[in-house]
Image (cartoon, helix red, strand yellow):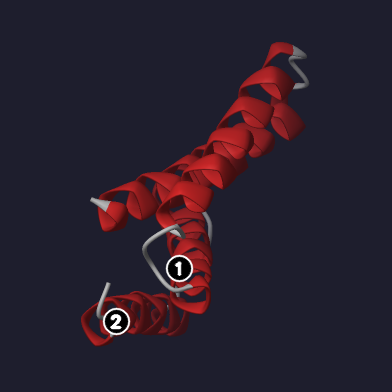
């Protein structure tokens, strides 16, 4: 269950970053509220997951989901570069996160 919570924490991190990007594009004040809510929820869920998952592993996976997720959303919805090198290195982040999951006993 902790791994599911950790994944949800990472997804909330992505949602927060996407909302921040939307705020920067459209300057709608209500988006600040949603961004803060997503970020607070993300860190709160991370804290719950870290009760079971080792801190270093949990933090690495959480930031990996945030980095990879933000980059993928940027490529799909914000016309960011889809250069093969970016895709390669995002793939390495994902592979690293999966590897950490399988090498952790929690």
User: Does residue 57 appear in this view?
Assistant: yes
Is 78 on the left or on the right of 34, as rendered?
left
Residue visible at 71% across and 28% down in the picture = 23
In-front residue for pair 76/43: 43
Q: Residues within 10 Å of mark 2 (few under 14, many from 20)?
A: few
Secondary structure under badge 2?
loop
Q: Position of residue 47 (x, y in %)?
A: 53, 51
Q: Position of residue 52 (x, y in %)?
A: 37, 62
> Looking at the image, is mark 1 or mark 2 earlier in the sequence?
1
Residue visible at 29% across and 81% down in the picture = 104
For the C terminus, the quadrant is bottom left
User: Does residue 78 appear in this view?
Assistant: no
Q: Are marks 1 and 2 in contact (CB under 8 Å)?
A: no
Is 24 on the left or on the right of 50, as rendered?
right
Residue visible at 47% across and 40% down in the picture = 12
Residue lying at the far front in this picture: please name it: 51
Is 29 on the left or on the right of 93, as rendered?
right
Residue visible at 55% across and 41% down in the picture = 44
In-front residue for pair 72/63: 63
The image shows residue 86, relative to residue 27, as above or below, that is below
Determine which residue is flagged by label 1. Answer: 58
Q: Which mark is residue 104?
A: 2
Q: Position of residue 79 (x, y in %)?
A: 50, 50
> Distance of mark 1 from mark 2, alpha carbons?
10 Å
Q: How many marks?
A: 2
Q: Residues within 10 Å of mark 1 (few under 14, many from 20)?
A: many
Q: Which mark is residue 91?
A: none
The image shows residue 65, relative to residue 74, as above or below, that is below
Secondary structure under badge 1?
helix
The image shows residue 59, relative to residue 46, as above or below, that is below
């Amino acid at each position: 269950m902790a791994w599911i919570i950790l994944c949800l924490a990472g997804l909330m991190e992505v949602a927060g970053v996407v909302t921040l990007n939307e705020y920067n594009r459209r300057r709608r004040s209500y988006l600040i509220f949603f961004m803060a809510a997503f970020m607070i929820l993300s860190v709160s869920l991370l804290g719950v997951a870290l009760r079971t998952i080792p801190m270093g592993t949990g933090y690495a996976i959480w930031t990996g989901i945030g980095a990879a997720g933000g980059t993928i959303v940027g490529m799909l919805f914000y016309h960011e570069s889809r250069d093969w090198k970016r895709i390669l290195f995002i793939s390495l982040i994902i592979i690293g996160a999966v590897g950490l999951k399988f090498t952790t006993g929690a």
